[in-house]
């Protein structure tokens, strides 16, 4: 029984989980594959202080990743250092050495995935990146294999566990964004600098990869509209509930007749949909297929072991293909060379909208706001106002019928000049039932 | 660009969906694969009257499946006739002719999957069966590839759309099983003879396949405990709701220290779990992994096009492997040759239970029932009784703390002799939160 040899670069959170699973699950992996996966080499800054599981046998340890990617025994390089600088060097060096690559690097694959895949295919090596999106949810395997026969109409995902944890705790406890964020930071659920999570950039990288896989287009992350969750208040959850909705940071990619619309933004979603049941740090992806209709995938979005499962499962597939000698690949990015890629500006998106205002109360407010909406031919749907004693900071909501994001923005811009408003109106799209 | 040729046997519901997708999606499939899939031959009883999509080009049509499986151009045989007689002949003949096989046949694969896989591997051909379980949910791809690195602790599935439709309609409308079943039959959602669906046998075949994939064991469907949904009443939904639960036909497979416990039966599941949000004819599978923790998969359980997506996705994978010349396979059944397969009798399952009684009201009923429970050392948890005017048919519920199914059965058997009972008590397990 010949074995396939692995070189690990990076032994942090995901790396540790990967090594643990490779050690503890070695027998089952060998039974499923018909051969063994062996950790031949490992690199990390503290590798010489690390006690690797004994059952792995002798592992070549080094502080220099170049010694892993050039190691003559290593068949597959696992890149788990993250970021876009050294990680990129590691992956390109592995390809130069004709090693296959498994990576969990969302940022790099979102930014340079297309080029890396092209190089990998030309070099006849294999590349796998299940762990780069939604940790324990095998959404790559689903898109690449499970429903590869379908044509994807839309994807909606909850892809950032930290934001989802904050939003669902705000909803559950009625607390403010700031309070829940501070607690999440104290508990280690959120970073000291939370921007990547709460401003939507982490989710945007993941959406870029998923959309590339789903639509076969070369997606540029900076093309994706992104808005974070900092402006959401507990009041918004109360009004959303009155409307039968809740609020989540939704990563959306939809094929429309005019082109692809991509966005990461807080949105109202109906409470009776399965997506609204995604609580805490869980992730989920909802896929609408032209033929397969609705499918939905849910699981841990991060964590050492769930993400480790994704890396190990990728290793098993890549190893199986290595052994079978099947290097011929088609890039999961940009297979759709039928037409030209047309990312639509978000302003062309059409949705009903939720508009939340904070005002100093006085007569004529609704008339002024309704007047601006009427000028833009936006139909008002409902006005919601909870009882409130504070006439100096009165929150209320107007919902409007389906209209374009462009018209909403123009209306909101005009409203912002009104002197009774304490802050610019918050406009959130109301997504269709998923 | 070389093509891979397909021979279709069976052009019914799933066959039509498959052919439609192969025709309409041909360009995208070719871009994803790097070569074309071509329908070279087709067999069905009405094949000569069938208008196949023009874009397929010339297709060899025959009434004799033997002409498909022996056709020199055919690389992959798609078996979509169902059942265990002719379908078995077709698959074995295809293997004899060294053709790869894609099938949607749950009954055959549940019963004879192990032997068919062994033959396929010996013959160096490939076999795929995504469509045999949960139609549009790519649960095979998930277990075989997506989370193959994990070790599965438990699977809970809703795998029969008809039963789930009936239960969720009973819950929503408060109607009886008989009434909702009759309507479902009138609408074509349920068969004239509904037994396979409502008595759990269809779900049992699917669970046998899933459990074989998940646990690597050779599962015999008749080893799986099965109980249908005929005894569930609208009253049970009301009591379940009071307990924060709902009722679904749950296919469960759990690895315990003592062995594997397998069952298909109606069970109480908590309302705040994602599984309880599976409504109507949708299917879902919840997987508990030792390393990956909870993942959840949801989608259409049947239907021409969703199941067609599963068949076409299988075809793409098998064709890719054919082209890569990678016949080496390990059976997805019975990879787990580490220990001996020990299916535990259902009587060893431990759960809290819901016991529902219908009685002629009179003093001493609770005392008599509680006395029997006490004798079996079963701890009573709660007694629930809705106001009811009919003293001659009074429904009420006792819940008990975790106990073994064996003890519950003995208690229920002893209760059945009590003369105030109108029917034997209904005992349903209360599943842990999923």
Image: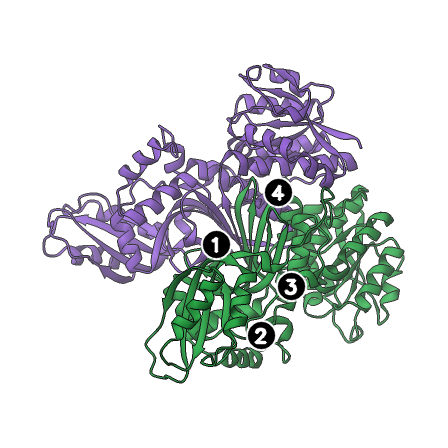
Chain colours: A purple, B green
Q: Which residue is mark 3?
A: B204
- Tag 1 and tag 3, C-beta contact below 8 Å: no
N-terminal label among 4 and 1: 4
Looking at the rendered structure, whether the residues under marks 1 and 3 are on a common chain is answered as: yes
Q: Chain of mark 1?
A: B
Structural crowding at the residue carrying mark 3, measured as other residues with C-alpha within 10 Å and reported as few (<14), some (14–19) or many (≥20): many
Secondary structure at badge 2 equals: loop
Q: Is residue A53 above or below residue A339?
A: above
Real-space CA distance between mark 2 and mark 1, rounded to the nearest whole angstrom: 30 Å
Q: Which residue is mark 2?
A: B189
Q: Which residue is mark 4?
A: B151
N-terminal label among 3 and 4: 4
Secondary structure at badge 1 equals: loop
> Which residue is painted at 19% across and 57% down in the image?
A386
Q: Chain of mark 2?
A: B
Looking at the rendered structure, whether the residues under marks 2 and 1 are on a common chain is answered as: yes
Q: Which residue is mark 1?
A: B432
> Which residue is painted at 37% across and 76% down in the image?
B364
Real-space CA distance between mark 4 and mark 1, rounded to the nearest whole angstrom: 20 Å
- Tag 2 and tag 3, C-beta contact below 8 Å: no
Instruction: Report the disc number at residue B182.
Output: none
Residue B397 location (% of width, % of height): 41, 70
- Tag 4 and tag 1, C-beta contact below 8 Å: no
Real-space CA distance between mark 3 and mark 4, rounded to the nearest whole angstrom: 22 Å
N-terminal label among 1 and 3: 3
- Tag 4 and tag 2, C-beta contact below 8 Å: no
Residue A227 location (% of width, % of height): 37, 41
Residue B262 location (% of width, % of height): 62, 57
Real-space CA distance between mark 1 and mark 3, rounded to the nearest whole angstrom: 21 Å
Q: Is residue A304 above or below residue B267?
A: above
N-terminal label among 2 and 1: 2
Secondary structure at badge 4 equals: loop
């Amino acid at each position: 029984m010949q074995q396939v040899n692995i070189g690990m670069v990076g032994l942090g959170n995901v790396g540790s989980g990967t090594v643990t699973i490779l050690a503890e699950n070695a027998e089952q992996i060998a039974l499923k594959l018909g051969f063994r996966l062996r950790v031949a080499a490992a690199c990390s800054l503290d590798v010489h202080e690390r006690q690797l599981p004994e059952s792995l046998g002798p592992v070549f340890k080094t502080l220099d990743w170049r010694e892993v990617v050039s190691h003559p025994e290593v068949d597959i390089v696992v890149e788990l250092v993250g970021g876009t600088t050294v990680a990129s060097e590691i992956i390109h060096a592995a390809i130069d050495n004709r090693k296959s690559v498994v990576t969990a690097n969302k940022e790099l694959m979102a930014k340079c995935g297309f080029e890396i895949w092209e190089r990998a295919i030309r070099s006849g090596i294999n590349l796998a990146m299940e762990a780069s999106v939604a940790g324990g949810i095998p959404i790559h395997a689903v898109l690449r294999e499970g429903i590869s026969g379908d044509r994807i109409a839309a994807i909606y995902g909850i892809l950032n566990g930290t934001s989802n944890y904050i939003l669902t705790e705000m909803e559950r406890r009625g607390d403010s964004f700031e309070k829940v964020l501070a607690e999440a930071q104290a508990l280690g659920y959120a970073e000291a600098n939370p921007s990547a999570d709460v401003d939507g950039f982490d989710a945007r990288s993941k959406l870029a990869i998923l959309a590339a896989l789903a639509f076969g287009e070369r997606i540029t992350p900076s093309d994706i509209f992104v808005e974070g969750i900092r402006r959401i208040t507990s009041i918004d959850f109360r009004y959303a509930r009155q409307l039968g909705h809740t609020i989540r940071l939704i990563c959306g990619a939809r094929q429309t007749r005019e082109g692809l619309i991509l966005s990461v933004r807080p949105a109202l979603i109906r409470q009776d949909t399965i997506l609204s049941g995604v609580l805490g740090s869980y992730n989920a992806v909802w896929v609408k297929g032209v033929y397969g209709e609705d499918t939905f995938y849910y699981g841990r979005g991060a964590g050492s072991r769930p993400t480790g499962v994704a890396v190990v499962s990728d290793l098993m597939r890549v190893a199986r293909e290595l052994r079978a000698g099947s290097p011929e690949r088609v890039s999961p990015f940009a297979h759709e060379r039928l037409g030209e890629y047309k990312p639509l500006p978000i302003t062309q998106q059409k949705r009903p909208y939720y508009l939340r205002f904070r005002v100093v109360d006085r007569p004529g407010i609704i008339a002024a706001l309704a007047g601006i909406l009427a000028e833009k031919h936006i139909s008002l749907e409902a006005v919601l106002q909870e009882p409130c004693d504070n006439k100096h900071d009165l929150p209320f909501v107007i919902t409007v019928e389906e209209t374009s994001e462009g018209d909403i923005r123009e209306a909101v811009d005009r409203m912002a000049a009104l002197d009774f408003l304490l802050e610019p109106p918050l406009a959130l799209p109301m997504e269709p039932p998923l």
